[in-house]
Amino acid sequence: MNVPVWGWFLTIGLMTVFLAVDVFVIARRPHVPSMAEAARHLAFFVGLAVLFGLFIWVQWGPQFAGEFYAGWLTEYSLSVDNLFVFLLIMGSFK
């Protein structure tokens, strides 16, 4: 898969925008998020991952899109697993 230079600039640019929004907008008012707020953020980022996979499908075909979705789903599952491990560790410290 040959990714054009504009693709790298777009990816890095979008990641920078998301990080800036997280640091300068969301973290500006620290609070305990509600379930609705967490669900909205989760739906937004999962939706972005699905759209990115569809973009890969259109640009480079189903093989690379399937590889992206498999990797994304694996990493997502591992991050959820890590949350349970952190909860167990923090729960043991009380």
Image: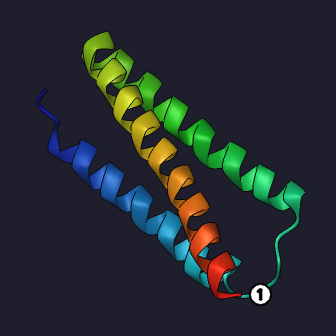
Location of residue 41 (image quadrant): bottom right
Q: Is residue 86 left or right of residue 28?
A: left
Residue at the (62%, 68%) spot, across then down: 88
Q: Label 1: which residue?
A: 29
User: Picture coordinates of residue 32 (x, y %)?
Assistant: 83, 78
Which quadrant of the figure contains the C terminus?
bottom right
Q: Secondary structure at mark 1?
A: loop
Mark 1 surroundings within 10 Å by alpha-carbon count, few (fewer than 14), some (14 through 19), many (20 or more): few
Color encoding of the figure: rainbow
Q: What amino acid is labelled 1 in the image?
A: Arg
Location of residue 12 with respect to 62 vertically, above or below: below
Location of residue 53 (image quadrant): top left
Q: Nearer the viewer, residue 60 or 74?
A: 74
Q: Nearer the viewer, residue 78 or 1?
A: 78
Residue farthest toward the front in the current orientation of the protein: 92
> How many numbered discs, if any?
1
Residue at the (60%, 48%) spot, across then down: 45
User: Picture coordinates of residue 20 (x, y %)?
Assistant: 51, 75
Which quadrant of the figure contains the N terminus?
top left
Residue at the (60%, 41%) spot, across then down: 46
Q: Is residue 94 left or right of residue 88?
A: right
User: Picture coordinates of residue 21 (x, y %)?
Assistant: 59, 72
Location of residue 48 with respect to 24 vertically, above or below: above
User: Picture coordinates of residue 80 (x, y %)?
Assistant: 56, 51
Residue at the (45%, 48%) spot, across then down: 78
